[in-house]
Amino acid sequence: MKRIFAIFALGCLTYGAFAQDTYYAAMLSRNNYYGTARSVALGNAMTALGGDLGSVGINPAGSAVNSFGQITITPGLLFQSSNSYWDPDDNGVFGPADKMTEVKFNIPNVGGTVVLYTGNNYGLKHITVGFLANNTNTFLDYSDAYGTNDKTSFLGNIAAWTNGIAFSGMGKEQYAAYMANQIGEFGPSGSLNYSGANQMIDPTDQYCYVPGTLNQRAMREIYGSKTDIILNLGFNVSDEFYFGFNLGLPTTKYRRSDSFMESAGNVYEFPVNFVDDNGVHQGNEGEPTTFYKSSDNTYSLNTDADGIYGKFGFIWLPVKGLRVGAAFQTPTHTTVHERWQYWARNSYVDSRYDGSAASPEGEYSYTLTTPYIVDFGVAATLGPLGLFSIDYELADYSIMKYSDIGRNYFAEDPWAYTNRANKLFCGVSHSLRAGLEVKPSPEFAIRAGYSLVTDPERYGFDSEGNMVTLQNWQGSHQRVSGFRHFQNNTHAFSLGLGYSSSGSFFADAALRLTKYPGSAYYPYYFGEYWVVDKDNKPLDVGMPYIKYDRSIFDVLLTVGWRF
């Protein structure tokens, strides 16, 4: 498993936005197609099939295959399950799995088509006009990890990061640190040096350490989706060749909240001394002011994005029973708007010293160019017995590019480093989709599907043969070559049933299990810091480290009418 650093980059808790990095761009760019229950049950291997509103987003020619219009709506349920494993000091020893589940209702597909007949028996026979909304990804990702720690603390992590910054100079550029100091999460231990409220300072004021055991908890809540609003035109030429165009208007809603909570296992092991503005100890002389109980730090992000792309595709029937299709989607030009905020809360045995604070809400807007997509498909139809279909798709993530809105092109590009990283450490993602449909009778169908999506992230090697990843890349001056892709693949398995009446009504149901690759992150926001024990001896430990895996189980039902 490759190691992924926490998306909470240092800048995310300063005045900068959340984390406009390569991982974030890939997350906003990635597709995990939904559609109708029929297309999902067939693994979305629809490039050469068409004839279904779930196929139109993959190949615009799919709308022209049928000689009738149709209306469909697809409600569904998503069941997300995750397992998180806690390692308190990144030594490779993980605790038992902390399991979490979440259920969401969605409508991943709704739309309709209208057929305009030309009256021709040959050549252009009809034109199909379609309008639909189709989910192309879901961001449902809830995790909850627990553990104990007597070496490091989150508040110590904040204090270590702010060492060297005068408190009087902490302003909007250091929101998290400013609020944490205001409510007593950390305080001065010397000139421009700080210690966390759950740390102790040695009698010589030379170092600080964690005096007891902390109960720690890291929670992550992510939800939202990416939905393509599609305006479609499809053309039927002699019932042998179909082509079509899409104007795609993707809209993305991404909501994220990351919380880190810690509390004293034994509060009396965590004495705290407060001083007033004049440096005078508050409380009885020779005794601690109070004792630390708990703290809670939360960062939230709301991302809204709107984009535009074009797509062209065709389906060709060279011989009876064989269908060939292909489609090309342009890069998507996306405008992204983000809002973020930080909250902190601290409590003590003496509640008079409790505090809470919230930062002002930050906002930032920029543009992001996402990958172009190419699809190829072949399908074999077996008359009334059923069909088999297989697709291949590639998406080039190396072209992902951030840019400021209204950028002055004569000024230095603030995104140059990130865009260079995108180009070097992201490549082509490959997808393979397959679907099988068997019809025991004209009214009923049984379906199965599978899809595989490869990871676009890659790594290379420096001139001495050392592995270079996105995390340890030292910048454009470091030569990297011999790139290879990480083997972190996403697999989806699906099953479905279909019913088609002799009239206009039809209905389909599908089940799909999507298994995402395992990943990991560090829940502290500000990177590693120097850790010592009570005798000022260095401890060879890291920060808490969490690995987790997740899957999503979809239940879909499509109802539709032909006319």
Image: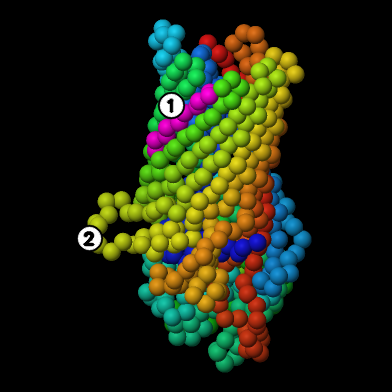
Q: Main secondary structure of the magenta part?
A: strand
Query: Which of the numbered marks, if any, corresponds to residue 479?
Result: none
Tally the marks: 2
The residue that mark 1 highlights is: 244
Q: Is residue 261 visible?
A: no
Q: Which residues are magenta?
A: 309-318
Counting from the top left corner in percent of width and height, residue 461 is at: 52, 70
Q: Quadrant of residue 378?
A: top right
Cα gap from disc 2 to disc 1, whole angstroms: 40 Å
Q: Quadrant of residue 55?
A: top right
Here the colouring is rainbow
Counting from the top left corner in percent of width and height, residue 489 is at: 63, 51
Q: Is residue 313 magenta?
A: yes
Local crowd size for mark 2, using a 10 Å CA cut-off: few (<14), some (14–19), many (≥20): few
| Quarter of the figure that contains the N terminus | bottom right
Nearest to the observer: residue 158 or residue 291: 158
Residue at image point 47% right, 26% down: 61
The residue that mark 2 highlights is: 410
**Amino acid type, callout 2:** Phe
